[in-house]
Image: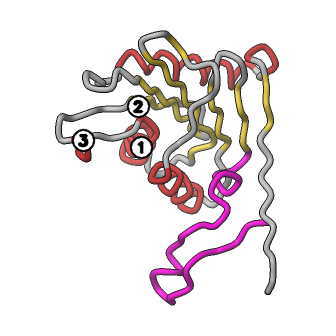
Amino acid sequence: MEEIELKSVIRKYSYEELDESFRKLVDQAKNATQQSYAPYSQFRVGAAVLLADGQVVIGSNQENAAYPSGLCAERTALFSANVQHSDTPVTAIAVAARNVDGFLPVPVTPCGACRQVMLEVEHRYGRPMTILLYGTDAIYVIDSVTDILPLEFELEGLLTGHRMKEHH
């Protein structure tokens, strides 16, 4: 038997410790929660994507009575950025969530589908994307999607049968 150890680094910051550009991105993610359509769960998520040229594209979760038909904030923002600015790399994404009581103290983390889409964005542009996850008690900063999706499914697996790549 062989054991594989995977390691991820997630840095924990206060809002004040972030540099100005990341504070602005977090603010835009928080504001994007206002555009959420969440009449069923009342769980409002906003995302803000920072492009290499400084532009920001926002997204929010969009629910539907046929639950599988909704879409997460991260994917609405990333898909919008990919359509509107297809040649401009994504450098960062900030995510914030709130419920009826306000913003969550602990950051919400992207679902598996969003992590896979975020990974594809990294591959598309050939560069890591910084992830900022907002909570009122802390903001998690992650240097790459591979830190939260260490056993990635990638195109090579579709073509050759190789199922996943390990990141250590």
Furthest toward the front, the residue is: 1
Residue wearing tag 2: 59
First in sequence: mark 1 or mark 2?
Answer: 2
Q: Position of residue 132 (x, y in %)?
A: 65, 33
Q: Is residue 110 left or right of residue 64?
A: right
Q: Secondary structure at mark 1?
A: helix
Mark 1 nearby-residue class (10 Å; few <14, some 14–19, many ≥20):
many
* Residue type for callout 3: Tyr
Q: Please state, as top left, top right, bottom left or bottom right, where the C terminus lies in the image.
A: bottom right
In this view, the mark in front (1 or 3): 3
| Amino acid on which disc 1 is placed | Arg
Where does residue 158 sit, x and y in percent of width and height? 45, 81
Region of the chain picked out in magenta, as a range: 143-168
Quadrant position of residue 44: top left
Image position of 137 with respect to 149: above or below: above
Q: CA distance from mark 1 to mark 3?
A: 16 Å
Task: Give the residue pinned by disc 3.
Answer: 67
**Residue drawn at point x = 61 percent, y = 40 percent:** 52
Inspect the image, locate mark 2, and give the three-letter code of the amino acid beneath it: Gly
